[in-house]
């Protein structure tokens, strides 16, 4: 008599589901680790290029703006969001340590400082332009002061400029000074109708308001920066970043996506002083500034996703493209799509497996 074939072990739906979940979680975990800010930076890093760093100063808990020094190689100027005071910090990218804290005088008490940019005049421009009340302040302020020639803690007198928008108050977190013309631009933060606003040719101090006029639509933006040669403008949100060719004082075309890292409260972006790298920053204690090398400009008439190496040219997403939304920590845009797709495939396969086993037992 021939022996009966062995009976396969009975797997309960709960056990099978647990096994599938374990596989899914493992796959997702591997993808997240592969796309963490550190991994993304490591993938794009090259010898001699600016590298990622961690802000070590415990006083910097809400780094909300970032700009590269021209006087001090490897130093980046940053500042906290609200509730800190009239301070700007110089951080050495080589060590992550603060090498200067600038105390500003002559500006009163800052309200909601959101951005910093360095102009061609060698002056730093600090944007007290946030409005968490949804755009109700009748005016906001810009503070201007010379970039210090020496590092170390010091007090500097700043000039205050009053700013209002031609089409009414709005919330904003992005201030960019064009590196050639010196003109100041502000990008408002709005899911539906964000705008790029152009300031007057020259800012006027004193009681007069400097009127900023809307020149383009932009998506949800938390910071922006011009390339050092002034030919490109990069804007970032919580989830996405795009680089726009800059022509005749306007962003042009649909833009090119930059695979900015997921950083939770993603708040800042700037170019390295040599223009080779985009530096992405975020709020939080010991937050990381992630270096993404700039890729070569795309051919005219093309637009496409930049890889992990970032993007600097090509034609960026049209002002008014779909706004980005808040995202969790770790990874980048491409990673998020891979995680979702991988999880969906694994879950679907698990369901089919359970379905077949259930049918076999019936």
Image (cartoon, rainbow, N blue to C red):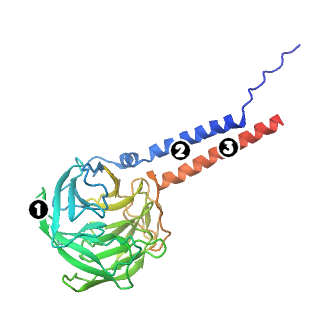
Look at the picture and state if 182 lies above or below 265. Answer: below
Quadrant of the snapshot with the C terminus: top right
Residue 103 horizontal side relative to residue 201, left or right: left
Quarter-of-image position of residue 206: bottom left
Residue 231 appears in view: no
The residue at 48%/68% (across/down) is 323
Look at the picture and state if 202 lies above or below 359. Answer: below
Find residue 89 and report its horizontal and vertical position in percent. Answer: 21, 58
- The residue beneath circle 2 is 28
Q: Earlier in the sequence, mark 3 or mark 2?
A: 2
Label 3 element class: helix
| Callout 2 crowding tier (Cα within 10 Å): few <14, some 14–19, many ≥20 | many
Find residue 294 and report its horizontal and vertical position in percent. Answer: 35, 58
The residue at 32%/61% (across/down) is 64
Residue 360 horizontal side relative to residue 188, left or right: right
Look at the picture and state if 52 lies above or below 230. Answer: above
The residue at 35%/85% (across/down) is 166
- The residue beneath circle 3 is 349
| Callout 1 crowding tier (Cα within 10 Å): few <14, some 14–19, many ≥20 | few
Q: Earlier in the sequence, mark 2 or mark 1?
A: 2
User: Residue 149, labelled with which disc?
Assistant: 1
Q: Nearer the viewer, residue 165 or 269?
A: 165
Distance between the alpha carbons at the discs numbered 3 and 2: 15 Å
Q: Nearer the viewer, residue 318 or 112?
A: 112
Asked if the residues shown at circle 2 and circle 1 are in contact, with their CB atoms under 8 angstroms apart, the answer is no
**Residue sticking out furthest to the right:** 1
């Amino acid at each position: 008599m021939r022996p009966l074939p062995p009976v396969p072990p009975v797997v309960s739906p709960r056990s099978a589901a647990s096994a599938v979940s374990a596989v899914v979680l493992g796959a997702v975990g591997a993808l997240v680790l592969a796309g963490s800010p550190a991994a993304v930076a490591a993938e794009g890093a090259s010898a001699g290029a600016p590298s990622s760093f961690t802000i070590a100063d415990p006083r910097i808990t809400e780094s909300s703006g970032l700009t590269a020094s021209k006087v001090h190689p490897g130093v980046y100027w940053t500042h906290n969001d609200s509730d800190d005071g009239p301070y700007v910090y110089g951080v050495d990218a080589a060590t992550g340590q603060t090498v200067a804290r600038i105390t500003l005088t002559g500006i009163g008490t800052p309200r909601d400082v959101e951005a910093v940019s360095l102009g061609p005049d060698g002056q730093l421009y600090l944007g007290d332009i946030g409005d968490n009340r949804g755009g109700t302040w009748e005016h906001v302020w810009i503070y201007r002061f010379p970039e210090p020639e020496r590092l170390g803690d010091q007090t500097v007198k700043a000039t205050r400029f009053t700013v209002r928008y031609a089409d009414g108050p709005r919330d904003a977190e992005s201030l960019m000074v064009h590196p050639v013309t010196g003109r100041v631009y502000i990008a408002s933060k709005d899911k539906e109708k964000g705008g790029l606003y152009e300031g007057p040719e020259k800012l006027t101090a004193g009681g007069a308001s400097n009127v900023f006029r809307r020149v383009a639509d932009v998506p949800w933006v938390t910071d922006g920066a011009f390339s050092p040669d002034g030919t490109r403008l990069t804007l970032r949100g919580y989830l996405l970043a795009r680089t726009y060719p800059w022509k005749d004082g306007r962003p042009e075309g649909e833009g090119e996506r930059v695979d900015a890292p997921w950083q939770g409260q993603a708040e800042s972006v700037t170019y390295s002083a040599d223009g080779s790298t985009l530096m992405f920053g975020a709020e939080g204690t010991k937050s990381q500034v992630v270096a993404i090398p700039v890729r070569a400009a795309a051919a005219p008439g093309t637009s496409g996703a930049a890889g992990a190496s970032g993007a600097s040219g090509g034609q960026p997403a049209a002002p008014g493209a779909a706004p980005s939304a808040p995202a969790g920590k770790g990874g980048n845009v491409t990673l998020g799509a891979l995680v979702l797709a991988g999880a969906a495939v694994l879950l679907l396969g698990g369901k089919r497996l359970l379905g077949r086993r259930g049918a076999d037992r019936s």
